[in-house]
Image: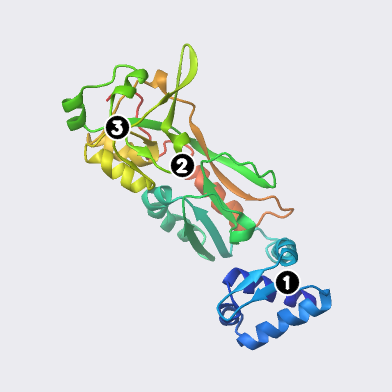
Amino acid sequence: MENTGELATFVRAVESGGFTAAALALRLSPSAVSKIVSRLEARLGVRLLNRTTRRIALTPEGELFFRRCQRILADIEDAEQAVAQSGGKAQGLLRVNTGVAFTSRYLVPVLPKFLERYPEVKLELSLNDRLVDLVEEGADVAVRMAPMADSTLIARRICDVHRRIVATPAYLKRHGRPGAPEDLVDHNCVTFALHPHLNQWPFRGPRGTWTVAVRGNVETNHSDALYGLVLAGVGIGRFSEMVVGPDIRAGRLVPLFDAEHDAEPQPLHALYPHRRFLSPKVEAFVSFLVQTFGRNAPWTCKPGRG
């Protein structure tokens, strides 16, 4: 198993971004970590890392080897867990990668219930709104609405999430209400600066599906800023029902179109690597998400024009 230890040290060094950080995690000295990686390179006959005084960087050969090592170590961990947890007990560290809005608004309030139900699970949450490589990030589960092209992942549907087009009552009082989706071209719509495809708003009706290209006098590259601008009455925006649901119910925002114009909802998925042995902790967490949000999700608003 000595070779396995070398692989684990190499992977930790890359994931940590340097020998010093890896040494702290592994309870070794930086020089010991450096020697282990050098020994591995000598045995393989290739340079895996380019080193400077401040950082390390993978060589092309190192990049290939790093990916394979991650998978090998993950398979070993799965095999060990399959034996150690043969009784089906959820325990150990569970790394979860999720979106900011979903986690802060809805997941965090229910996590105490999950942790009470599974007291031997230690949860590590990583929040961002970008798609991640689960293996690269070291995550056990990701929760995402975006379509997944990676066929190596298992996607379990949690629920469907609609997007709503909204404005404040004050904005509608000043500028009038669009009677049909096509009328949006005459309104000030707050848009994304770095994602132009998100400014093609989709609709569905008796004549099929179509999009309306919207524009306005403010654009931003941050979803929270965009939402704040709409709440401030600057213009019209399109958001996940997760985000706008509470403000619609409170009357701060008004949904602009009937349900017949709603585009197809996006499924919210729990994603995890395709492995032979599914860890009980992963199964427990995914099942908890489905049970908690699969029916009567707390963000759901009744269809309609407000």
> What's the residue type where badge 3 is placed?
Ile
Frontmost of labels 3 and 2 is 3
> What's the residue type where badge 2 is placed?
Phe
Q: Quadrant of the N terminus?
A: bottom right
- Mark earlier in primary sequence (1, 3): 1
- Mark earlier in primary sequence (2, 1): 1
Q: Quadrant of the C terminus?
A: top left
The residue singled out by tag 2 in the image is 293
**In the image, is residue 45 above or below residue 74?**
below
Frontmost of labels 1 and 3 is 1
The residue singled out by tag 1 in the image is 48
* Cα separation between marks 2 and 1: 44 Å
> What's the residue type where badge 1 is placed?
Leu
Q: Secondary structure at mark 2?
A: helix
* Cα separation between marks 3 and 2: 28 Å
Q: Write down the quadrant of residue 148 in the picture.
A: top right
Q: Is residue 42 left or right of residue 25?
A: right
**Do the residues under discs 3 and 2 have CB atoms within 8 angstroms?**
no
The residue singled out by tag 3 in the image is 236
Q: Give the percent coordinates (x, y) of residue 23.
A: 60, 82
Q: Secondary structure at mark 3?
A: loop
Seen from the viewer's position, the closer of residues 89 and 43 is: 43
* Colour pattern: rainbow
